Image: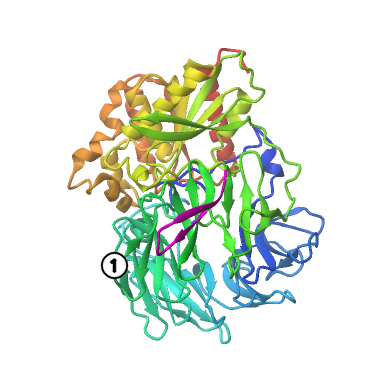
Amino acid sequence: MFKVVLSRSRLLPVILLLASLSDASARVRSFDQVAISPDGTRVAWVSSAENAAGEDIGGSAIYITDLRSPGSKPQRISAVAGNAAATENHIAWSPDSKQLAFLSDIGTDSQPQLYVAQVATGASRKLTTLTGSLADPAWSPDGKSIGFLFTENAPRADPLLPIPPETGVIANKVYEQRLSVVDIASGTVTQLSPSNMYVYEFDWSPDSAGLALLAAPGAGDANWYVAQLYTLTLASPVLKPIFKPRLQIAGPRWSPDGRNIAVISGIMSDEGFVGGEIFVVPAAGGPARDVTAGVPSSPTNLYWRGSNEILFAENVDGQAGISMVQIGSGKISNLWTWPGVIATDVYRSAIDVSLSADGLQSAVIRHSWTQPPEIWAGPIGKWEQITHSNSGVVPTWGEPKSLHWSNDGMKIQGWLIYPVNYDPSRRYPMIVVAHGGPATAVYTGWPEEFFNMLELSARGYFVFNPNPRGSLGFGEKFAEANVKDFGYGDFRDILAGVDEIVRTLPVDDDRIGITGWSYGGYMTMWAVTQTQRFRAAVSGAGLANWQSYYGQNDIDEWMIPYFGASVYDDPAVYARSAPITFIKNVKTPTLVLVGQYDGECPAPQSREFWHALKTFGVPTQLVIYPGEGHVFIQAEHQRDVMERLVAWFDHYLKPKGEN
């Protein structure tokens, strides 16, 4: 339910480095996507656009480097002449590695369209003239067509953006994202999937005759949580149901022999933040088989290597990993792990890898809390750095360490950031940061944009990032351990981690605060109703009342797998986990922040919590940011969030005059 980057996924906070606290973000060049060519000889990526002098010109641009010529200057691929600015992204290689498909919004209407460029010459050709949202181009294996997702006349590109104000008669207008195909030779576009179905992901069959897709009827934002696996053919585009999962599914991949389709299935609170177990389903229909049952990690993306092996990226114990499973035997082999992030693009999971056709070469955007993002390529786990755009950037926060502790018979993991210039003879305040989701985990990647808590370590705080039950990275049983139990077991896990830190490190137990965004905002509201241990709190886009939230948000379907029923069928289970139920217990000074047009965690939830605290005389302040959605886009609002948050914690957790 909550999200980390402005992307196609759902609900978790996007993190931001603010110039008022640090100028590190101003110096960091971002990388939004990377893809290695099928023949393994070239790497393409998307990053901020620059002119010949290396100056940022706005928008994003596509670059290609030839791995056979180390040190050569990257070539820009574009629909733009000269150094004109545009937003160009969503890259996809042709099967023969000679062409690159991409989206570009060049033009007077800034409407993204699909283009194809010849890599050898750089010449590009416009393939579509559409109005709406386009995404995820993918070539057919025979190279004759490109499939993509298209939402005609879409009012906004992402559910985390502000929802349009609702006035007058509220119509249930649904904009369906449809699977579409463009013929390369003629430019003819065909919308294949039915007009009443929203398609989330797809994959081509190896013979190019059909596609596998994840789809559901109705509104896309809500119904990803009930999507099923279907197939259709180009000759007869009628959806054939293949697999109705117990929980969410993601990442359909057709096997090379055409006999099976693999997906990841598990409890997932956010589209795009993937984790679960790998199921193999016969393409013709039949029982699905879990080939990673009980794996102590969360597979996030998968790739067939032959027809009996699946390579998968995974979140494992708070780290990025890559493993292999033998379909027949179920044997799993870990190939590589690392305490950081390997990614291919901002539109999907934070852990992924781009593979060549033979699986021997790969490319990633690699970064961590100690290493800024760069493009790396080579055999898996033996990558060499391709770009050096951020070679002069160093962290301005303290040392990160992975921690483990036990609670309720479970092994729990989290990350602790030490204060800058840590002195073990001093006693320090600490901020607990509850992550969003809940089905996600703390990724130790270089902070991007909104709500960056690492900077608090530069101001003399320990910063604790726990991964309690319900998080990804520790197996599906662990991820489902908070079902019908929000705020209970997961909060006990957090408190047990705080106890362990206070016991072993010079943290002042009388100067601990808590914060979080989205589900982390909910956990912050919950925390102050359950204990007075926290001396200050800052809740961002929180949830005060699950019962009223059910009818206020745009994505109510995500709640049923977690609560076991709708609020209309079992209101008591929702009330049991609602902070408002225990609101009279609150004594902790609490700052409440939210966007005016947040469709994921609507502003009335924050107002309801603030109103109650104000009524009972608890120090509190509510800030509703005009025009913002679930993540904040306006720089002045991003700065204001951090400045208020830091001032709030400094006021309540630091003696006057302490840095």
Magenta-colored segment: predominant secondary structure? strand
Quarter of the image for residue 51 reads bottom right
The residue at which mark 1 appears reads as 287
Q: Describe the element under mark 1 as helix, strand or loop.
A: loop
Q: Quick check: 207 left or right of 480?
A: right
Identify the residue at image location x=59%, y=36%: 639
452 magenta-colored: no
Asked whether 386 or 303 is in front, the reply is 303
Of residues 291 and 34, the one nearer the viewer is: 291
What's the image's color scheme? rainbow
Q: Does the magenta stretch include residue 329?
A: yes
Query: 275 above or below 581?
Result: below
- Residue 208 position, x and y percent, is 48, 80
Q: Nearer the viewer, residue 122 or 542?
A: 122
**Residue reaching furthest to the left:** 569
Query: Residue at coordinates 65% horizontally, 38% vertically from top-left?
Result: 370
